[in-house]
Amino acid sequence: MTLHGPSRLTLALAFVAAMCGSTLRAEDTSSPPAAAEPAEKPAAAAADAVPAPAPAASAESPAPSAAAPAPAAAAVPAEPVQWHTVTGTDGSFSAELPSAPKYSTQRVATGTGSLYVVHQYLLEHGDAAYIVQTAVYPEDINVANPRVNLQGGLDNLAKGMEGAKWASVDWVSHQGLTAADAVGARNGHAVRSYSVMKGRQVFTLIYAGTPGTARSPDVNRFIASLRVAP
Protein backbone atom coordinates (compact mmCIF):
# COMPACT_ATOMS: atom_id res chain seq x y z
CA MET A 1 0.00 0.00 0.00
CA THR A 2 1.39 3.41 -0.94
CA LEU A 3 1.72 5.90 1.91
CA HIS A 4 0.82 9.55 1.37
CA GLY A 5 1.09 12.90 3.15
CA PRO A 6 1.02 12.69 6.95
CA SER A 7 1.75 8.95 6.89
CA ARG A 8 5.09 9.57 5.23
CA LEU A 9 5.75 12.38 7.67
CA THR A 10 4.95 10.08 10.57
CA LEU A 11 7.50 7.59 9.25
CA ALA A 12 10.11 10.33 9.01
CA LEU A 13 9.36 11.42 12.58
CA ALA A 14 9.50 7.84 13.86
CA PHE A 15 12.94 7.52 12.32
CA VAL A 16 14.12 10.77 13.85
CA ALA A 17 12.77 9.90 17.30
CA ALA A 18 14.41 6.47 17.24
CA MET A 19 17.76 7.85 16.15
CA CYS A 20 17.49 10.73 18.59
CA GLY A 21 17.44 8.36 21.52
CA SER A 22 20.66 6.70 20.45
CA THR A 23 22.43 10.00 19.87
CA LEU A 24 21.28 11.96 22.93
CA ARG A 25 19.69 14.62 20.77
CA ALA A 26 16.50 16.64 20.64
CA GLU A 27 14.03 17.33 17.89
CA ASP A 28 10.89 19.52 17.21
CA THR A 29 8.29 19.92 14.42
CA SER A 30 5.25 22.17 13.71
CA SER A 31 3.92 24.75 11.37
CA PRO A 32 2.55 28.16 12.35
CA PRO A 33 -0.93 29.41 11.57
CA ALA A 34 -1.22 31.88 8.72
CA ALA A 35 -0.87 35.55 9.58
CA ALA A 36 -4.03 37.65 9.64
CA GLU A 37 -4.76 39.63 6.50
CA PRO A 38 -4.44 43.42 6.98
CA ALA A 39 -7.66 45.41 6.75
CA GLU A 40 -8.37 46.88 3.32
CA LYS A 41 -7.62 50.55 2.93
CA PRO A 42 -10.94 52.49 2.46
CA ALA A 43 -11.25 54.50 -0.72
CA ALA A 44 -10.97 58.28 -0.46
CA ALA A 45 -14.29 60.01 0.19
CA ALA A 46 -13.73 62.41 -2.72
CA ALA A 47 -13.65 59.50 -5.17
CA ASP A 48 -17.28 58.56 -4.40
CA ALA A 49 -18.76 62.05 -3.90
CA VAL A 50 -20.86 63.65 -6.67
CA PRO A 51 -19.83 67.31 -7.04
CA ALA A 52 -22.57 69.91 -6.50
CA PRO A 53 -23.27 72.30 -9.42
CA ALA A 54 -21.11 75.43 -9.13
CA PRO A 55 -22.69 78.91 -9.35
CA ALA A 56 -22.12 80.84 -12.58
CA ALA A 57 -18.91 82.80 -12.44
CA SER A 58 -18.98 86.55 -12.86
CA ALA A 59 -16.21 88.86 -13.95
CA GLU A 60 -15.90 90.18 -10.38
CA SER A 61 -16.00 86.88 -8.55
CA PRO A 62 -12.85 84.69 -8.39
CA ALA A 63 -12.91 81.22 -9.95
CA PRO A 64 -13.76 78.53 -7.38
CA SER A 65 -10.83 76.49 -6.18
CA ALA A 66 -10.82 72.71 -6.62
CA ALA A 67 -11.80 70.81 -3.47
CA ALA A 68 -8.94 68.87 -1.87
CA PRO A 69 -9.54 65.09 -1.80
CA ALA A 70 -10.19 63.55 1.60
CA PRO A 71 -7.10 61.75 2.97
CA ALA A 72 -7.15 57.97 2.70
CA ALA A 73 -7.42 56.09 5.99
CA ALA A 74 -4.26 54.30 7.12
CA ALA A 75 -4.16 50.53 6.72
CA VAL A 76 -4.52 48.54 9.92
CA PRO A 77 -1.35 46.44 10.51
CA ALA A 78 -1.81 42.68 10.80
CA GLU A 79 -1.60 41.14 14.23
CA PRO A 80 1.68 39.19 14.71
CA VAL A 81 1.21 35.43 14.80
CA GLN A 82 1.45 34.17 18.36
CA TRP A 83 3.51 31.02 18.90
CA HIS A 84 3.56 28.74 21.92
CA THR A 85 6.58 28.95 24.23
CA VAL A 86 7.87 25.68 25.67
CA THR A 87 10.04 25.75 28.79
CA GLY A 88 12.04 22.72 29.93
CA THR A 89 10.82 20.94 33.06
CA ASP A 90 14.10 21.89 34.73
CA GLY A 91 14.05 25.43 33.36
CA SER A 92 17.18 24.75 31.30
CA PHE A 93 15.78 26.06 28.01
CA SER A 94 12.86 27.61 26.18
CA ALA A 95 11.75 27.46 22.54
CA GLU A 96 8.82 28.60 20.43
CA LEU A 97 6.49 26.38 18.38
CA PRO A 98 3.43 27.29 16.30
CA SER A 99 1.18 25.69 18.95
CA ALA A 100 1.35 23.52 22.05
CA PRO A 101 3.28 20.24 21.48
CA LYS A 102 2.86 16.81 23.07
CA TYR A 103 5.34 16.12 25.85
CA SER A 104 6.83 12.69 26.52
CA THR A 105 9.89 11.10 28.12
CA GLN A 106 11.87 7.99 27.29
CA ARG A 107 14.57 6.14 29.20
CA VAL A 108 17.48 5.24 26.94
CA ALA A 109 20.69 3.28 27.56
CA THR A 110 24.17 4.17 26.32
CA GLY A 111 26.49 1.60 24.78
CA THR A 112 27.85 0.80 28.23
CA GLY A 113 24.40 0.40 29.77
CA SER A 114 24.07 3.74 31.57
CA LEU A 115 20.52 5.08 31.56
CA TYR A 116 19.41 8.62 30.82
CA VAL A 117 16.09 10.33 30.10
CA VAL A 118 15.18 12.02 26.83
CA HIS A 119 12.53 14.76 27.16
CA GLN A 120 10.61 15.33 23.92
CA TYR A 121 8.14 17.97 22.75
CA LEU A 122 6.47 17.00 19.46
CA LEU A 123 4.13 19.06 17.31
CA GLU A 124 2.76 17.73 14.02
CA HIS A 125 0.88 20.22 11.89
CA GLY A 126 -0.29 19.32 8.39
CA ASP A 127 2.71 18.29 6.30
CA ALA A 128 5.24 19.67 8.79
CA ALA A 129 6.46 18.74 12.24
CA TYR A 130 8.62 20.36 14.91
CA ILE A 131 10.42 18.44 17.65
CA VAL A 132 12.40 19.67 20.63
CA GLN A 133 14.43 17.20 22.68
CA THR A 134 16.86 17.51 25.53
CA ALA A 135 18.87 15.04 27.56
CA VAL A 136 21.78 15.00 30.00
CA TYR A 137 24.77 12.83 29.12
CA PRO A 138 25.59 10.14 31.72
CA GLU A 139 28.93 10.30 33.51
CA ASP A 140 30.45 7.61 31.27
CA ILE A 141 30.18 9.90 28.22
CA ASN A 142 33.21 12.07 27.52
CA VAL A 143 32.03 15.63 26.90
CA ALA A 144 35.44 17.30 26.79
CA ASN A 145 34.93 18.15 23.11
CA PRO A 146 31.25 19.06 22.37
CA ARG A 147 31.86 19.08 18.63
CA VAL A 148 32.88 15.42 18.73
CA ASN A 149 29.65 14.54 20.59
CA LEU A 150 27.46 16.49 18.17
CA GLN A 151 29.27 15.08 15.15
CA GLY A 152 28.66 11.57 16.43
CA GLY A 153 24.94 12.28 16.61
CA LEU A 154 24.92 13.73 13.09
CA ASP A 155 26.76 10.69 11.74
CA ASN A 156 24.23 8.31 13.27
CA LEU A 157 21.29 10.28 11.92
CA ALA A 158 22.90 10.49 8.47
CA LYS A 159 22.67 6.71 8.08
CA GLY A 160 18.92 7.02 7.52
CA MET A 161 19.03 10.17 5.36
CA GLU A 162 18.81 10.16 1.58
CA GLY A 163 22.29 9.41 0.24
CA ALA A 164 23.30 8.45 3.79
CA LYS A 165 24.53 11.99 4.39
CA TRP A 166 23.49 15.53 5.25
CA ALA A 167 23.28 17.98 2.36
CA SER A 168 24.98 20.60 4.52
CA VAL A 169 26.35 20.97 8.05
CA ASP A 170 27.24 24.38 9.50
CA TRP A 171 29.12 24.75 12.78
CA VAL A 172 27.97 27.86 14.60
CA SER A 173 28.03 29.47 18.03
CA HIS A 174 24.75 29.70 19.96
CA GLN A 175 24.97 31.93 23.04
CA GLY A 176 28.68 31.15 23.05
CA LEU A 177 28.02 27.37 22.94
CA THR A 178 29.02 24.89 20.22
CA ALA A 179 26.12 24.18 17.84
CA ALA A 180 25.55 22.22 14.61
CA ASP A 181 22.98 23.22 11.98
CA ALA A 182 22.36 20.38 9.49
CA VAL A 183 19.98 20.06 6.53
CA GLY A 184 19.09 16.92 4.59
CA ALA A 185 16.20 14.82 3.28
CA ARG A 186 14.38 11.72 4.53
CA ASN A 187 11.38 9.89 3.00
CA GLY A 188 10.71 12.79 0.62
CA HIS A 189 10.74 15.37 3.43
CA ALA A 190 13.19 18.14 4.17
CA VAL A 191 14.85 17.64 7.57
CA ARG A 192 16.74 20.20 9.60
CA SER A 193 18.54 19.42 12.84
CA TYR A 194 19.94 22.09 15.15
CA SER A 195 21.86 20.83 18.19
CA VAL A 196 23.53 22.72 21.01
CA MET A 197 25.61 21.43 23.92
CA LYS A 198 26.07 22.97 27.34
CA GLY A 199 28.17 20.86 29.68
CA ARG A 200 26.55 17.43 29.77
CA GLN A 201 23.20 18.63 28.46
CA VAL A 202 22.29 18.57 24.77
CA PHE A 203 19.38 20.44 23.16
CA THR A 204 18.15 19.54 19.68
CA LEU A 205 15.48 21.13 17.50
CA ILE A 206 14.37 19.17 14.45
CA TYR A 207 12.06 20.15 11.64
CA ALA A 208 10.55 17.85 8.98
CA GLY A 209 8.43 19.19 6.15
CA THR A 210 7.94 19.56 2.43
CA PRO A 211 11.02 19.83 0.19
CA GLY A 212 12.64 23.26 0.12
CA THR A 213 11.27 24.44 3.49
CA ALA A 214 14.22 23.64 5.77
CA ARG A 215 15.32 27.29 5.81
CA SER A 216 11.93 28.96 5.44
CA PRO A 217 11.10 31.98 7.65
CA ASP A 218 9.00 29.85 10.02
CA VAL A 219 11.73 27.25 10.44
CA ASN A 220 14.36 29.94 10.93
CA ARG A 221 12.11 31.47 13.60
CA PHE A 222 11.82 28.09 15.29
CA ILE A 223 15.60 27.57 15.33
CA ALA A 224 16.34 31.13 16.47
CA SER A 225 13.83 30.86 19.33
CA LEU A 226 16.00 28.43 21.34
CA ARG A 227 17.21 30.03 24.56
CA VAL A 228 19.55 28.08 26.82
CA ALA A 229 19.41 29.15 30.47
CA PRO A 230 22.63 30.59 31.97
Image: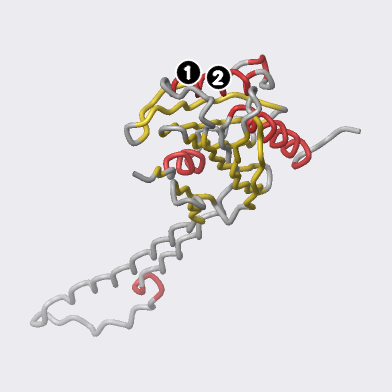
Quadrant containing the C terminus is top left
Left or right of 22 on screen, residue 229: left
What numbered label is drawn on residue 34? none
Quadrant containing the N terminus is top right
Instruction: Tell me where residue 42 appears, x and y as whole percent.
Output: 41, 69
Q: Are marks 2 and 1 in contact (CB under 8 Å)?
A: yes
Residue found at the far right of this picture: 1
The vertical placement of 98 against 161, above or below, is: below
Residue type at mark 2 is Gly
Q: Residue at x 33, y 83 (%)?
A: 52
The vertical placement of 96 against 55, above or below, is: above
The vertical placement of 162 against 62, above or below, is: above
Q: Residue at x 34, y 73 (%)?
A: 46
Mark 1: secondary structure: helix
Viewer-proximal residue among 105 and 179: 105
Left or right of 72 on screen, residue 159: right
**Crowd tier of the residue under label 2, counting other residues whose Cα lies within 10 Å: few below 14, some 14–19, many 20 or above:** some
Mark 2: secondary structure: helix
Instruction: Tell me where residue 79 appears, x and y as whole percent.
Output: 44, 62
Instruction: Tell me where residue 212 appears, x and y as whole percent.
Output: 58, 30
**Quarter of the figure with residue 11:** top right
Q: How many marks?
A: 2
Residue marked by disc 2: 152
Residue type at mark 1 is Val
Q: Residue at x 62, y 51 (%)?
A: 103
Viewer-proximal residue among 149 and 223: 149
Residue marked by disc 1: 148
Measure the alpha-carbon separation of dots 2 and 1. 6 Å
Instruction: Tell me where residue 93 appears, x and y as whole percent.
Output: 44, 46
Q: Residue at x 45, y 43 (%)?
A: 221
